[in-house]
Amino acid sequence: MGVSNWNVAGEEMCPHRLVLEHVTSRWGVLILIALDERSYRFSELRRHVGRVSEKMLAQTLQTLERDGLVHRDAKPVIPPRVDYSLTELGREAAEQVKALSAWTDRRMDDVQEARRAYDAARS
């Protein structure tokens, strides 16, 4: 993909950047990784992800659903039951995010050393 597809001139947010922002957002990453394990009900997912407000979780799930990454299955029972799972597209995105997460785990010591060197050079 060429740079022109990313609208580097800073004009209106291009679709590529929006999807990347949704997938790599703080909560988007954690939701995709969690849902790659299994489907979750809203409250289960909130507990699993941790420290996310109901509003932010709902907004992020809605955004990921709109992008075709998350499937929302509302069952017509009492009390209402809604399960969230990944679509095929969502599983593909989750694999990419998990690869970046695994790289972060593998290279965190190097990142911390680089930070120490940077901070020492500036002090």
Image (cartoon, grey):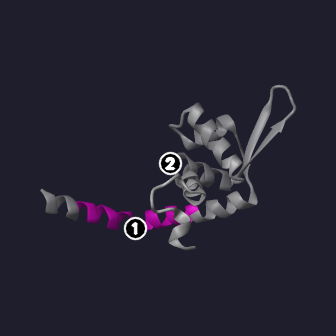
Residue of label 2: 26
Residue occupying image coordinates x 80% and y 29%: 80
At numbered mark 1, what does the secondary structure look like: helix, strand or loop? helix
Residue occupying image coordinates x 79% and y 34%: 81
The answer to whether 88 is drawn above or below residue 75 in the figure is: below
**Which residue reaches farthest bottom?**
2
Front position in the image: 39 or 58: 58
Q: Quadrant of the N terminus?
A: bottom right
Q: Is residue 108 magenta?
A: yes
For mark 2, does the 10 Å Cα neighbourhood hold few (<14), some (14 to 19), or many (20 or more) residues?
A: few
**Which residue reaches farthest left?**
123
Tell me if 37 is positioned left or right of 82 in this view.
Answer: left
Front position in the image: 89 or 102: 89
Q: Identify the amino acid type marked 2.
A: Arg
Mark 2 and mark 1 in contact? Answer it, CB < 8 Å.
Answer: no
Q: Which residues are magenta?
A: 97-116
Residue occupying image coordinates x 57% and y 49%: 28
The answer to whether 110 is drawn above or below residue 33 in the figure is: below
**Residue 95 coordinates in the image, percent (x, y):** 62, 64
Residue of label 1: 107
**Residue 51 coordinates in the image, percent (x, y):** 50, 37
How many marks on residues? 2
CA–CA distance between discs 2 and 1? 19 Å
The image quadrant that residue 69 belongs to is: bottom right
Q: Identify the amino acid type marked 1.
A: Arg
Tell me if 31 is positioned left or right of 41 in this view.
Answer: left
Q: Quadrant of the C terminus?
A: bottom left
**Residue 84 coordinates in the image, percent (x, y):** 73, 44
